[in-house]
Amino acid sequence: MGLNGGVIDAREFVTEDADRLLDEWGRIALIPAPEGGEGPRAELIANLAEASGANAAIDAAGNVVATVDGDDPDGETLTLLATMDDLGTVAAHRAATDRLHRDGDRFVGPATETTSSDATALSILRFVGRETRPWRRLIVAWVLGEETGLTGVRALVDQHGTELGSVIDLMGGVGTVSWNAIGFAGLEVEFAAEPRHTLYGGTSEVPDAISRFIAALDSDGYPRHAPPFDADPLTVRRVNRVHAGNVFNHSPATGTVGIDIRSTDPTVLAEVEAVTRGAAEQVARQAGVEVRFSDGERQPAITLPGGREHRLVQALATAIRDIGREPVLRSWSSSNINIVYAAGLDGIVHDSAHRGGGRGTADEWTDIPGVLDGVAADCRMLQLLAPRSQ
């Protein structure tokens, strides 16, 4: 129930708040925030969060962390995450221009996509300022490093741990509800043999082994391409890098194949990696070469207990329907939420089914109605998660 005794309509609130949201969104987007240079944007966001009714501070890692205490000291804590940093290409375009304008339903200019989540989180702070607060605490954290190694959320989790409670990662926009942390099992396979001059004839053993290996992966029944994005679990394996030889007239001494294996199921991830290693060993025996393995990018696969039936998933999906959109349920994510799961916390991601276009260019644009509907859905979700009858 709102402070006036009734439940606030989230869509009506967003209509009232839209001009302020767009103004703040633009102010934030005009400040480039490349890796290591997020400070000016962080200072602005901290000031805007204070003006929106929260206690805000910049932590030691450079994140902006705002808190709003609730009315129930025994209730749960909810944490909202927003992305504060830019990709290097986006920051470079923003630094080179002051282009920022509205073109119909489009907000046009570099950095508008990422900063839509920052403006979303500020608007939500104003919404909860008008609601009763049947929870212990709401934490809103604008984290850096989402584009460059998840450094901000790692620091946040290290500092606060379970005090963060249930976590919702806001990506800006509306429509997609994601859960589970997709795991990576990057694998580097190196084949080796004695190099020989072309005039000796025969087969160039290392390229032969590489071609046999890739053919074996194509025919073994494990996924080469991702199945539909609503698959659960989602698993994919793909050869992304191949290299062998630098000398025109000699067979190479070594050659490498880089394979990206991903799955939301840790058991499946391990199984596909084991089969892939086995295929490389078999090919090495057939081709008469040596084979060595090394790890590439690694990240554990973690599942959200209950999956699509989890209360966070259900609350956000219902909220999206309540504001007139149809949710897309996706059982995988690769974002700040991965670090949240690794710490043993529950969480989901609210992403946009269609945020905009021109990402990383001077013509970047973001869909304004989608962002506004996303704010309304997030606010409605907070109402649905509250321990009260709606």
Image: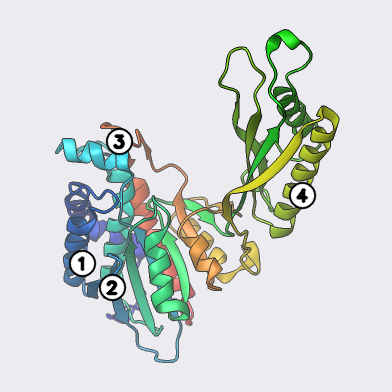
Q: Amino acid at mark 2?
A: Ala
- Seen from the viewer's position, the closer of residues 39 and 111 is 39
Residue beneath label 4, please? Answer: 274
Residue 198 falls left or right of residue 87: right
The x, y position of residue 271, in whole percent, is 77, 52
Residue 39 falls left or right of residue 334: left
- Seen from the viewer's position, the closer of residues 323 and 317 is 317
The image's colouring method is: rainbow
In what element is the residue under mark 4? helix
Q: Amino acid at mark 3?
A: Glu
Mark number, residue 46:
1
For marks 2 and 1 on the same chain, the one whose residue lies earlier in the sequence: 1
**Going 23% across and 56% down the picture, which residue do you hit?**
21
For marks 3 and 1 on the same chain, the one whose residue lies earlier in the sequence: 1
Residue beneath label 2, please? Answer: 66
Tag 2 near tag 1, CB within 8 Å: yes
Residue beneath label 3, please? Answer: 364
How busy is the neighbourhood of tag 2: few (under 14 within 10 Å), some, or many (20 plus)? Answer: many
Residue 284 versus residue 245 in the image, above or below: below
**Alpha carbon separation for disc pair 3 and 1:** 25 Å
For marks 1 and 4 on the same chain, the one whose residue lies earlier in the sequence: 1
The x, y position of residue 34, in whole percent, is 27, 48
How busy is the neighbourhood of tag 4: few (under 14 within 10 Å), some, or many (20 plus)? Answer: few
**Going 62% across and 62% down the picture, which residue do you hit?**
302
Residue 195 versus residue 191 in the image, above or below: above
For marks 3 and 2 on the same chain, the one whose residue lies earlier in the sequence: 2
For marks 4 and 3 on the same chain, the one whose residue lies earlier in the sequence: 4
**Alpha carbon separation for disc pair 3 and 2:** 29 Å
In what element is the residue under mark 2? strand
- Seen from the viewer's position, the closer of residues 238 and 106 is 238
Q: Amino acid at mark 1?
A: Ala
What quarter of the picture does the N terminus occupy? bottom left
